[in-house]
Image (cartoon, grey):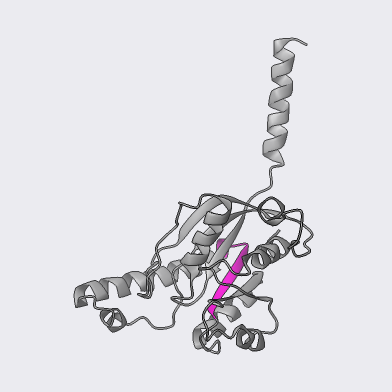
Amino acid sequence: MSTRKRMKRFLSKLMLALLFKKKAVKIGIYGPPNAGKTTLANRIIHTFVDENEDVGVSTEIPHETRRVIRRAGILIDLKRKFYNGGGNPLPKVSRAKLMLDVVDTPGLATKIDFRDFMAYGLPEDEAKRRAKEATEGVIEAIKWLDDIDGVILLMDSTEDPYTQTNVVIIGNMEARGIPIIIAANKIDLPDAAPQRIKNAFPQHRVVPVSALKGDNMEVLYAEMAKVFG
């Protein structure tokens, strides 16, 4: 076969691969402040990309993430990462791979008061600046819903799930027809009660996890492949 023909065949295969390449789904991580959204985004990246890469930092101060951060091109490969050929088989899923872009969003809140930041020792000027940025971040996160393929809605399982913020978030996403998985986070804490979240929102799949410790994350990944794949 001539060099010209080989090159033509190679280019033809390349074009087909590009044309039929599956588009990554954009998965937004949403929830109220301090629910663990950035911790979850970091956990996904540490598991499937690079354990030394972070999308952001998490502290006890609310609204630490005040801008939407997108990490593109993450391949969730359940069989390669979790199946060990012996015990602990994966939960049954129709597909074991999912290519996604993770979109870490600022904490959603119906009210942002600069005095809440001052309670953590921040000076008034810094607190007001953060409150302004946090408010802008909430607006940006809501706008991103127009371009999101699915949502992991994070809730703190140590807190009361019947809040105005949670109800508004879920209502907004249901109205848009966005697929939702609720992750009941912080099950590593002694006062965690994920069943309260299941009781509050029985119409949605609730997966108890600890994004910090990694507890039950393989179940969440399997659910993501099932719902978003």
Q: Is residue 155 magenta?
A: yes
Question: In which quarter of the view is residue 153 placed?
Answer: bottom right
Q: Residue at x 68, y 25 (%)?
A: 11
Q: Compared with residue 68, is residue 154 higher up or lower down, i.e. above or below?
A: below
The quadrant in which the N terminus is found is top right
Q: Compared with residue 4, is residue 39 higher up or lower down, i.e. above or below?
A: below
Name the residue furthest top.
2
Q: How many marks?
A: 0
Q: Is residue 152 magenta?
A: yes
Question: In which quarter of the view is residue 168 placed?
Answer: bottom right
Q: Compared with residue 78, is residue 158 higher up or lower down, i.e. above or below?
A: below
**Foreground pick, 90 / 71:** 90
User: What percent of the width, then of the height, locates residue 155?
Assistant: 54, 78
User: What percent of the width, then of the height, locates residue 175?
Assistant: 63, 77
What type of secondary structure mainly makes up the magenta span?
strand
Q: Which residues are magenta?
A: 146-156
User: What percent of the width, then of the height, locates residue 68?
Assistant: 45, 62
User: What percent of the width, then of the height, locates residue 80?
Assistant: 69, 50
**Foreground pick, 150 / 86:** 86
Q: Residue at x 60, y 68 (%)?
A: 151
Q: Residue at x 70, y 60 (%)?
A: 225
The quadrant in which the C terminus is found is bottom right
* In the displayed structure image, the side of residue 202 where residue 140 appears, left or right: left
Question: In which quarter of the view is residue 6 placed?
Answer: top right
